[in-house]
Image (cartoon, rainbow, N blue to C red):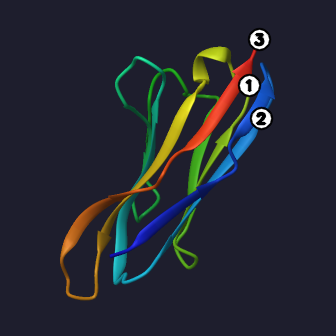
């Protein structure tokens, strides 16, 4: 089973920036889509951004123009550059990846989450 480990969360003032990273490791043949979700207290988990293995991207309307998702396929890592952060971006951010293992089975894996807090 592969693992996803996130890093880069923290506390930042409104208008500031953070860069999240998520590295995959373990029994991996290939990785298809990778993405970021977030969950604020009392709210459902929501999609933030997703990137395909070919580099195609999709963003939630609330983050378009402020967040950029990218990936390094050689390092099996996905990034989320977050600029002009707002208090409403405060949430636990989760990385996810669609992984094909060495047995050619495909499944979705999730990271443990990293807290992002934006103060006003």
Mark 2 vs 3: CB contact within 8 A = no
In the shown orientation, is residue 34 left or right of residue 89? left
Mark 2 element type:
loop
Residue on which the image places disc 1 = 84
Residue 109 drawn above or below residue 86: below
Where in the figure is residue 108, as x and y percent of width and height? 28, 59
**How packed is label 2: few (under 14 Cα within 10 Å), some, or many (20 or more)?**
some
Q: Which residue extends farthest top?
A: 120
**Where does label 3 land, which residue?**
120
Looking at the image, is mark 2 or mark 3 nearer the viewer?
A: 3
Residue 28: percent from the left, percent from the top? 37, 81
- The disc label shown at residue 17, or none: 2
Name the image quarter holding residue 75.
bottom right
Label 1, label 3: how many angstroms apart (C-alpha)? 12 Å
Q: Nearer the viewer, mark 1 or mark 3?
A: 3
Q: From the viewer's perspective, is residue 30 above or below residue 64?
A: below
Q: Toward which corner of the image does residue 16 lie, by quadrant?
A: top right
Q: Which residue is rendered at x = 28% and y = 88% of the image? A: 102
Q: Earlier in the sequence, mark 1 or mark 2?
A: 2
Tell me the residue at 42%/64% (across/down). Answer: 54
Q: Nearer the viewer, residue 52 or 47?
A: 47
Q: Nearer the viewer, residue 103 or 32?
A: 103
Tag 1 and tag 2, C-beta contact below 8 Å: yes
Q: Give the structural element (helix, strand or loop) at label 3.
A: loop
Give the quarter of the figure containing the C terminus.
Answer: top right
C-alpha gap between disc 2 and disc 3: 14 Å
């Amino acid at each position: 089973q592969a693992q996803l480990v996130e890093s880069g969360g923290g506390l930042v003032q409104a208008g500031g920036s953070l860069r999240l990273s998520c590295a995959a490791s373990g029994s991996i043949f290939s990785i298809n889509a990778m993405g970021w979700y977030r969950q604020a207290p009392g709210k459902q988990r929501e999609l933030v951004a997703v990137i395909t293995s070919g580099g195609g991207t999709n963003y939630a309307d609330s983050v378009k123009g402020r967040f950029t998702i990218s990936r390094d396929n050689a390092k099996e890592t996905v990034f989320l550059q977050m600029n002009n952060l707002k208090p409403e971006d405060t949430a636990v951010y989760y990385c996810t990846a669609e992984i094909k293992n060495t047995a050619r089975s495909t499944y979705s894996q999730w990271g443990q989450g990293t807290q992002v807090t934006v103060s006003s």
